[in-house]
Amino acid sequence: MLCMHEAFPNLKCAPHQHEAEQFSIMLKGRMRFVIGEEERVLGPGEVAYIPANVPHSIESLEDYVQVLDVFAPLRPDIIARLQELGHS
């Protein structure tokens, strides 16, 4: 599953986890990732790997951010949210 995410500066996402593995590919801007106990700041061209069921959070820094997230397997929660928004 591929998802394009955008974030305005200083957006914070609370710690969460899911059954899918995740690769986050930074396209624009800089973002702080906390994955388990590790904290990293990534910029364009860099990739974060988040194993299944590992708590993680993100924070966009002073820039507008674009990230391509790759999930395996599919995330039913994202599919349900898209359906709620009328994007089937």
Image (cartoon, helix red, strand yellow):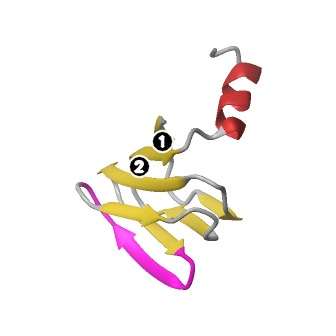
What amino acid is found at the position of numbered circle 1 in the picture?
Answer: Glu
What amino acid is found at the position of numbered circle 2 in the picture?
Answer: Val
Residue labelled with disc 1: 6
Whether the residues at callouts 1 and 2 have beta carbons within 8 Å, the answer is yes
- In the image, the segment drawn in magenta is 35-44
Residue 37 pos. (x, y %): 55, 85
Residue labelled with disc 2: 65
Residue ID at (73%, 29%): 80
- The total number of labels drawn is 2
Residue 81 pos. (x, y %): 72, 31
Q: Quadrant of the C terminus?
A: top right
The tag earlier along the polypeptide, 1 or 2, is 1
Residue ID at (50%, 46%): 72
On screen, residue 44 versus residue 30, left or right, reads left
**Figure quadrant of residue 52:** bottom right
Residue extending farthest right: 84
Residue 19 pos. (x, y %): 64, 55
Q: State whether residue 29 is above or below residue 3.
A: below
